[in-house]
Image: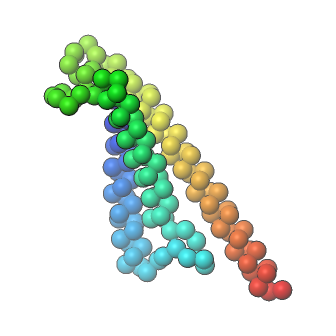
Amino acid sequence: MACFLVVAGEAMVTTVVQKTVEKKEKQQGIKADNTSGISWGRKLGWLNKMLWGGTALLALEHVWHGEVVPWWPFLTAMENPADISPMLHEMATIGGAMSLTVTAIWAVMVLVADAKFKSSVRANNIGAGA
């Protein structure tokens, strides 16, 4: 019904955080290169792309199934007061689970990317010293 709103809410928050982090990195002269690794602004950009992409796909799916309409109150579950409670339950359970899953996958991506970067730096240092 409206589970995509939870993912959209997280995407809005992380977008603001990303812009703030990128601004601070720019002020401090931090940029991602072969010696400093991947910046947090870029990593947050990955998360935002995953969240906004998921939001768009979920919203499209909800429009396709008639759960979201282009007239007030936009969510068909809001038309009947009896449907509001199940909608909020779905948002809390399904939407929350989707948000946590996407964020967990992103966290694994960050760990793998950092590990690969560190191993490539180690390999380059060994190769340069030989």
When the figure is inspected, residue 87 is found, relative to residue 97, above or below; the finding is above
| Viewer-proximal residue among 108 and 66 | 66
Task: Determine whether, in the image, residue 41 is placed left or right of residue 36.
Answer: left
Task: Determine whether, in the image, residue 94 is placed left or right of residue 120.
Answer: left
Furthest toward the front, the residue is: 64
Residue 27 can be seen in this image: yes
When the figure is inspected, residue 15 is found, relative to residue 92, above or below; the finding is below
Residue 3 can be seen in this image: no
Residue 116 on image: x %, y %: 68, 64
Residue 42 on image: x %, y %: 47, 64
| Viewer-proximal residue among 24 and 73 | 73
Task: Determine whether, in the image, residue 94 is placed left or right of residue 59.
Answer: right
For the C terminus, give its image quadrant. Answer: bottom right
Q: Please tell me how many numbered marks the rendered image carries.
A: 0
For image coordinates 39% across by 60% down, the residue present is: 18
For the N terminus, give its image quadrant. Answer: top left
Task: Determine whether, in the image, residue 82 is placed left or right of residue 99.
Answer: left
Residue 23 on image: x %, y %: 35, 71
Furthest toward the top, the residue is: 82
Q: Quadrant of residue 54?
A: top left
